[in-house]
Image (cartoon, rainbow, N blue to C red):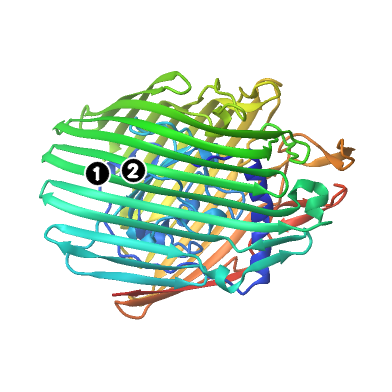
Amino acid sequence: MPLLRHPHRLALSAVALACVPSAWAQQAEAPAEPIHLEPVEIQGQRARNAAGKQTLTREELSRIPGSSGDPMKAVMALPGVTTTDDSSSAPAVRGARPQDNAYYVDFLPVGYLFHLGGFASTFHPDLIRRFDLASAAWSPEYGDVVGAVFDISLRNPRSDRLGGKLDFSLLGASVLAEGPIGDGVSFFLAGRRSWFDLAVKTVEDEKEGVSLTVPVYHDSQGRLLWELNPGHRLRLDFSTANDRIDFTTKEGSRAVQRDPVLLGNSSMHQSYSSFALSWDGEFAPSTSNQLALGQMATRDFTRIGSAGFYDAEVVTTYLREQLRLAWTPEHATTLGAAVNSRLVDLELDIQDPRCTEFDPNCDISTAGRVVSLQKTRQNQAEAYAHHRWRLTPQWTATGGLRASRDFYLRQTFTEPRLGLEWNVLPRTLVSVGTGRHHQPPPIEQALRDIGNPQLAHLRSTQHVLGVTQALDAGWSVRAEVYRKTFQGYAVDDPALNYRNGGSGTASGFELLVKKDGSERLTGFFSLSVSQARRRNDLTGESFRFDYDQPVIATLVGQYKQSDAWTWGAKWSYHTGSPYTPVVGTGVYPDGRPKPVYGAINSLRVPAYHRLDLRLDRKVSDRFTYYVELINAYNRKNVSGYSYSPDYRTREEAYQLPVLTSFGIQYSF
């Protein structure tokens, strides 16, 4: 269950995180986390070839330059994945917003995968075994999502002896301990915390008049695994993540002149914790079952100067069941069901501008104040079936149906998902997928007082066609075309707070040319050519999506000189992000200059490109380190513009400058 994403939280994060790159520029060059990971084999090659789905191992992701050894940060280099700047905390995928993604780890939902500011993911990198990204027309086991599904598989604890790893970098430090603790029982326990804030308490943005604390994050994961017998096991899993950033805006500063309610102390705090008990059973080589009972709590607190605060806690209790049956070599069926009970506890006293992507005007200082204290129970139920039928040695068909009921909003959905695969040649696969999907509105948009309990779910129809060609010497080529349509985005309404009135489209072509890691030279080239738009169906206005970047290209290369030395480079490029220009000025009722905006997202910042370099050194089986040079040729990539208080002049805001990053790891 995602955290609440109220509009003034997004506005606040824009103010705070916009200061982060310049803050880094004023401090010592800062590294990120060190990780060196052993290769693992992909399980289930079929998933790699499915239309709209990519499967990668941690070895493929962990040493990509610029990722600081974090496999989940490296997914930003994959086709169809985009962000608006270097400090983005979550990616957007194929025309959908970051909040339209769903995150799962070993069959269990988690709150979020990326820390504020994009410094790290929320799981210890050494625990990640495999990563699946479903970006269009995914199978019916996934629901309540229209953007993309991030599905992570963790490895199990080691069972031979006690051991672990210590990681250290200027951005964070982590520890991992694991091993057996009894007959058939093993565990792992990992924790990580940023600590740069202990050395640098605050940084100053003199131009804006903002004093900013260095973002603080920490996370932890644990697993207790009990092998009941060769075919059955119990798992007790937990994971937590916590992020906080504070800043103070001074009297007379540019930020306060533009928005007086920013005066004083502001803060953002988000966290989640998840606990679950799971049973995995294999009744025969052809039958397996998963059953999980768990609870996840998310917390989202924001305070904005004198505008007020809101505090939201969501506790979700869930029961999930999935049965897999391989009837014959030609037929396999997956059946599943889940029930979720969500308790939303909300307290707020804040000026609420009800900003959406369909209106650039988001002035908190003139917004009306909303006061609310409420608890709401929201229940959901779902069931799905998916069948895979190998029609002939060359043809395979997949079909599925997902049925779900939202008891809070009183809406029911029945959605088909279909696919077809054709092995044209032994190493050539053509695959196609189509499906209908839905997603509930953000929690706060559907609550009384601040939202509209009559909002309908966001709906999406998605189509994807792909071709995968395996070549000699570890080379492969994958190409896909896709189209998505979205209906039911919420727009601001003076009487109802929000109403369904927005739609969107996304279409594109993606190419991935890859060299696997069996030899010294490995890497890949990815290319995305796409278009994503939004439309206000009430006014007829059509405009570019906030994350629309028509051309995205990434080139990654790694050369293993020896067992001790590995070199790598990554060059990335994308079209500049769109923005809404200020074309004139007016006057707010309180006398402040008021920006008059042009057409939404009608202009773009300059194109983005960056080169990252990396050197890995294996000193011994226990000790390794890496060094990275981020933005090696010091490209001044523009993330946006900072306007003067009268909106008559502006200055460019830049992303990360050239930085040196390093990290070390010790195994025991």
Q: Identify the image quadrant of residue 392.
A: top left
Residue at image position (31%, 32%) is 421
Q: Identify the image quadrant of residue 141.
A: top left
User: How packed is label 2: few (under 14 Cα within 10 Å), some, or many (20 or more)?
Assistant: many
Q: Nearer the viewer, residue 23 or 271?
A: 271
- Residue 44 in percent (x, y) is at 25, 45
Q: Is residue 423 visible?
A: no
Q: Are marks 1 and 2 in contact (CB under 8 Å)?
A: yes
Say left or right for 651 vs 507: right
- Residue 281 in percent (x, y) is at 16, 42
Residue sticking out furthest to the bottom = 619
Residue underneath mark 1: 278
Query: Along the polypeptide, which appears first: circle 1 or circle 2?
Result: 2
Q: Nearer the viewer, residue 304 or 632?
A: 304
Q: Quadrant of the N terminus?
A: top left
Residue sticking out furthest to the front = 373
How much space separates mark 1 and mark 2, taking CA atoms?
9 Å
User: How packed is label 1: few (under 14 Cα within 10 Å), some, or many (20 or more)?
Assistant: many
Q: Nearer the viewer, residue 524 or 245?
A: 245
Disc 2, SS? strand
Measured along the vertical axis of the image, is residue 601 above or below residue 512? above
Q: Which mark is residue 305?
A: none
- Residue 129 in percent (x, y) is at 31, 55
Residue at image position (32%, 58%) is 473
Residue underneath mark 2: 108
- Residue 384 in percent (x, y) is at 30, 26
Residue at image position (29%, 35%) is 320
Residue at image position (14%, 52%) is 227
Say left or right for 16 vs 422: right
The three-letter amino acid code for the residue at tag 1 is Ser
The three-letter amino acid code for the residue at tag 2 is Leu
Disc 1, SS? strand
